[in-house]
Amino acid sequence: MVVGQWMSEEGAVSQNTPLTDEPGAHFEFRPTMPGQKPPERIPLQPPPQELFQIQDRAQQLMSLVSHDGNLPNQIQAYYEQAQMADQDFYGDLASVHSGFMRDALTLVQLHYTEERMVKFRGRTGWDRIADFKGADIRDQTDVRVLASHIEPRTRSSIEQRIMNIAQMFPGYFPPEVLLSALEGGTAEGLIEGYEDDVARANEIIGQIKSGAFYELPKRPVFPGEEPAVVENEETGQQEFATEMPGWMPRPHVDNVSVWKAIFANFMKSDEWNHQLDDAQKAATMNVFGVLLDLEMKEAQRTAQMQSEQAAEIGMANAAGGGSKPLPSLPALNNGSGGGAPQAPQGPPETSPSGPAQ
């Protein structure tokens, strides 16, 4: 079917070279007589569609016999069942851990009489209690353990999680922190600073609830901090204070945004609404107001720095030689076949006798 055949009138083809199916063969024929047609190639017909149908049917039968078509679906179903089994296992294991720690806290409540150092994670985060006793738990023995906290993770999955966090918050984590987390194979290092800020904010909240907020010792003024203006008792002149309240956030150390979120959540709680007195609520609102003021000043400093940088760039561009030349314009078609554009003409000159010709 690939090597075409020929049709010719009787006697046109030489008897010495009969037509065959040899590829690329050369056949001679006699010169045509008047009215005699030269040999013509028989048009090639496409392969019958039934051949392709037979091929497709054969492939389907081979896939059916070898179970090749159902294999991906079976693997996916098996993987989903195994995943559900793992989730059930870790959920049950988390229940065992929480029940064990609940019993342990009950024993602590009954038998601990000495002061000990513990760290509780309450509604608003980590709370440090310096003089904790077992009796302080009272009837609060609720323990929650999430299955995701005890589920084992591979190093590749942890590294992928770290990269996802870095992409969600571009520029938030310093490169040294990301490298340390990748090298250590754990993502907990990324949130160590966040947890410390949460603990620090909750420590201030604990001082407010205990009534020792205004008794906190003062701290020195940090570099870059705006101290308050006070009056010198000896000279009577105005000067900057050298000390700040001990609870004040430290610049470039404490995260004001985290503090503000912690205090905002605390002010929404039932404890703040129903258990704190007016003085404690006023102290909380005082801290929250200071946080808002610090955040606003930081935003103003950032905007000022951006404005100064833009002004410096503008001055550098102005000192660089002026504006760039305009691009050349295409020639105007004024009927002369192209060429440079003609300068615009002014109004026609006039004479006392009339307009110019």
Image (tube, grey):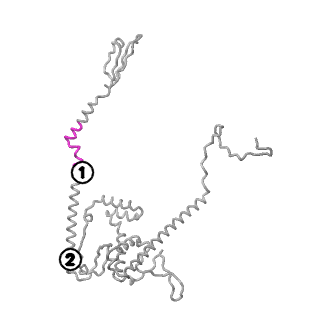
- Residue type indicated by callout 1: Gln
Residue 314 in magenta? no
Vertical placement of 175 versus 237: above or below? above
Residue at 60%, 53% (x, y): give it. Answer: 324
Q: Which residues are magenta?
A: 58-75
* 286 with respect to 143 (left or right): right
The spot of residue 263 in percent (x, y) is 37, 74
User: Does 338 appear above or below 304?
Assistant: above
- Give residue 353's quadrant in the image: top right
Assign a secondary structure to mark 2: helix
Residue 67 place in picture, x, y as percent: 20, 43
In the displayed orientation, state which residue is furthest to the right.
Answer: 352
Q: Disc 1 designates what residue?
A: 76
Q: Residue furthest bottom?
A: 234
Q: Which mark is residue 176?
A: none
Residue 290 horizontal side relative to residue 153, left or right: right
Return the residue nearer the eye: 170 or 158.
170
Q: Label 1, label 2: how many angstroms apart (C-alpha)?
A: 45 Å
Residue 347, compared with residue 61, is above or below; it is below
Horizontal side of 332 relative to 294 (left or right) equals right
Left or right: 254 in relation to 112:
right
Q: Say what amino acid the circle numbered 2 marks.
A: Thr
**Secondary element at image label 1:** helix
Q: Which residue is mark 2?
A: 106
Tell me where residue 192 appears, x and y as whole percent. 35, 69
Identity of the residue furthest to the front in this view? 354
Which secondary structure is most common in the magenta stretch?
Answer: helix
Q: Is residue 70 magenta?
A: yes
Dot 2 surroundings within 10 Å: few (below 14), some, or many (20 or more)? some
Q: Say which quadrant the N terminus sits in.
A: top left
